[in-house]
């Protein structure tokens, strides 16, 4: 039975196998859909027009605000299930899961109703959109609000899937549904030129994912068939989740306030010039999500009793994220104009090239910050992340307004990049303070981070193609030399060399 195999597999996984195999499946689940999105987006912009495309990108960010209403239960549930799975308490885990799913579904219903009530005021009095689009936009957003219970329920079930390390079947589910998330709206627009049809298609995709996740949870946790809700199990989760609630309240503000403020201060059309390059570079965060998605439950299960494994998980996570992100972020920064011109046209390239450079720098450090933030939550210190988020909101909003006033939409990109860099530095330092055994890992992280910062800052300047190619080559070579000499241990270097020799030998024998 799955229940007898999966916990043993969970316990047997080494940190390196855990990150490589599970993060690999998580990335695979996103690469295909992202490729489709890149192909489909130009056509969607053309069919919708700038105004409606800007409204669509803003509306989609509304999904992220639904997490405000889970009172921190979603992430706390993931942590609690991971601990119980590692201890072999499967029936208790099942009871906790069914309780969490029902509770989050109810919270999702409430959040959808609250969002639906507020969206009318925002559409008619907040957004600067043509009058003839207001009714269509309002109805489309109401459809989106109706998916809130599905979003919350899916998040709860993903926690179970993560705890049982069932990333392979989960991503085999995600790939076709996520592809339809982009292809579906395009197909609908061919027969119904309306944002309402687009939102209905997205809602159906969410429903399909809920059904598929439910079936997978029953397979990996058959005890769910006999589970009974026990709301007393949620009490300790709410104690941790109380602080996570604060983070949930501030995260959408920090993540999406730039878009809403651009639309309100400037216009929804100008928002498109910001959100389009942002969505391109933000896709690189799938690397961070893939790694932290598998590392978080593992660190939550090991930090109390196995410091060595926890430290290895943390350092390996940071190195994996950084070494995969850096060349992609540098490439998007150096060749931002060419990428945008080829993808969505010269108009976007002229208006968004500089934005993409700053956003690329921010995405790199946002990736490392994601690992640091996940670690702080996994060791039971969400209070720090919550406090930091409150301070950030108080500082970020006035800074964003100031930079928008003086530098226009470019100011929003600068503010976001600066926030990502400062977050990263603060959380790494806090992780060492809360978990002193982590202190030795900083010397492995600092050198490569410094090289990456210098290279990405140099890429902010416009250069000719030849100089950009030269900068790309020098920066990448320098970065990986520093990683090899300063970020890897001697045993890791020996292991990588041995693996390279085996691959080379196998290829020579095949030839």
Image (cartoon, grey):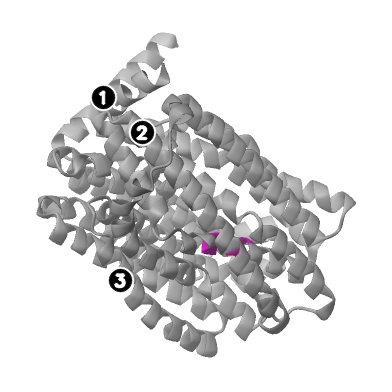
The residue lying at 33 percent from left, 57 percent from top is: 238
Decide: few, some or many residues near mark 1? Use Cα within 10 Å; few <14, some 14-19, many ≥20. few
Which residue was labeled with disc 2? Answer: 20
Proximity of marks 2 and 1: CB atoms separated by less than 8 Å: no
Sooner in the amino-acid sequence: mark 3 or mark 1: 1
Up-down relation of residue 229 to residue 253 (above or below): above
Instruction: Indicate left or right for 30 with 208 as reference.
Output: left
Sooner in the amino-acid sequence: mark 2 or mark 1: 1
Of 412 and 12, nearer the camera is 12
Q: Nearer the viewer, mark 2 or mark 1?
A: 1
The stretch in magenta equals: 60-65
Instruction: Indicate left or right for 293 with 16 as reference.
Output: right
Decide: few, some or many residues near mark 3? Use Cα within 10 Å; few <14, some 14-19, many ≥20. some
Estimate the x, y position of residue 9 in percent, counting from the top left.
32, 23
Which residue was labeled with disc 1? Answer: 12
Q: Is residue 63 magenta?
A: yes
Q: Residue 311's quadrant in the figure?
A: top left
Which residue was labeled with disc 3? Answer: 388
Q: Nearer the viewer, mark 2 or mark 3?
A: 3
Q: Residue 420's quadrant in the figure?
A: bottom left
Estimate the x, y position of residue 369 in percent, counting from the top left.
33, 59
Q: Does the magenta stretch include residue 163?
A: no
The residue lying at 60 percent from left, 57 percent from top is: 339
Distance Cα–Cα, label 3 vs label 1:
36 Å
Distance Cα–Cα, label 2 vs label 1:
14 Å
Instruction: Indicate left or right for 95 with 317 as reference.
Output: right
Q: Residue 22's quadrant in the figure?
A: top left
Q: Is residue 221 visible?
A: yes
Q: In which quarter of the image is the C terminus?
A: top left
Of 416 and 372, nearer the camera is 372
């Amino acid at each position: 039975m799955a229940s007898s195999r999966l916990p043993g597999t969970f316990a047997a996984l080494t940190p390196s196998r855990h990150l490589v195999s599970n993060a690999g499946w998580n990335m695979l689940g996103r690469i295909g859909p992202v490729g489709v999105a890149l192909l489909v987006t130009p056509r969607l912009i053309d069919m919708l027009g700038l105004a409606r495309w800007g409204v669509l990108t803003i509306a989609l960010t509304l999904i992220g605000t639904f997490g405000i209403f889970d009172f921190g239960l979603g992430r706390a549930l993931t942590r609690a299930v991971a601990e119980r799975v590692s201890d072999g308490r499967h029936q208790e885990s099942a009871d906790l899961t069914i309780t969490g799913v029902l509770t989050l579904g109810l919270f999702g219903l409430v959040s959808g109703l609250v969002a639906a009530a507020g969206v009318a005021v925002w559409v008619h009095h907040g957004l600067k959109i043509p009058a003839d689009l207001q009714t269509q936009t309002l109805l489309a957003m109401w459809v989106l609000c109706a998916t809130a219970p599905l979003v919350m329920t899916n998040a709860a079930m993903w926690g179970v899937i993560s705890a049982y390390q069932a990333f392979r079947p989960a991503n085999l589910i995600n790939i076709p549904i996520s592809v339809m998330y982009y292809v579906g709206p395009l197909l609908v627009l061919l027969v119904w030129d309306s944002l309402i049809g687009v939102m209905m298609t997205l809602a159906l995709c969410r429903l399909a994912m809920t059904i598929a996740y439910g079936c997978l949870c029953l397979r990996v946790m058959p005890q769910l068939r006999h589970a009974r809700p026990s709301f007393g199990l949620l009490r300790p989760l709410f104690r941790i989740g109380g602080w996570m609630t604060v983070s949930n309240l501030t995260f959408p503000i920090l993540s999406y306030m730039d878009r809403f403020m651009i639309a309100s201060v400037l216009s929804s059309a100008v928002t498109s010039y910001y959100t389009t390059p942002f969505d391109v570079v933000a896709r690189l965060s799938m690397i961070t999500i893939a790694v932290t998605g598998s590392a978080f439950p593992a660190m939550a299960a090991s930090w109390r009793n196995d410091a060595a494994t926890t430290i290895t998980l943390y350092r390996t996570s940071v190195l994996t994220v950084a070494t995969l992100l850096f060349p992609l972020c540098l490439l998007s920064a150096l060749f931002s104009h060419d990428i945008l011109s080829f993808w969505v046209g010269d108009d976007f390239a002229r208006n968004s090239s500089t934005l993409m450079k700053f956003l690329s720098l921010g995405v790199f450090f946002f990736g490392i910050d994601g690992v640091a933030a996940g670690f702080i939550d996994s060791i039971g210190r969400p209070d720090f992340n919550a406090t930091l988020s409150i301070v950030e909101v108080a500082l970020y909003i006035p800074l964003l307004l100031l930079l928008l006033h003086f530098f226009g939409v470019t100011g929003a990109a600068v503010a976001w990049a600066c926030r990502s860099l400062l977050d990263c530095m603060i959380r790494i330092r806090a992780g060492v303070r809360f978990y002193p055994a982590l202190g030795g890992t900083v010397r492995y992280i600092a050198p490569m981070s410094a090289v990456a910062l210098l290279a990405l800052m140099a890429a902010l300047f416009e250069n000719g193609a030849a100089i950009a190619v030269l900068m790309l080559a020098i920066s990448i070579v320098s970065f990986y030399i520093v990683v090899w000499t300063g970020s890897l241990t001697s045993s890791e270097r020996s292991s990588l060399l041995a693996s390279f020799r085996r691959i080379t030998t196998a290829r020579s024998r095949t030839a």
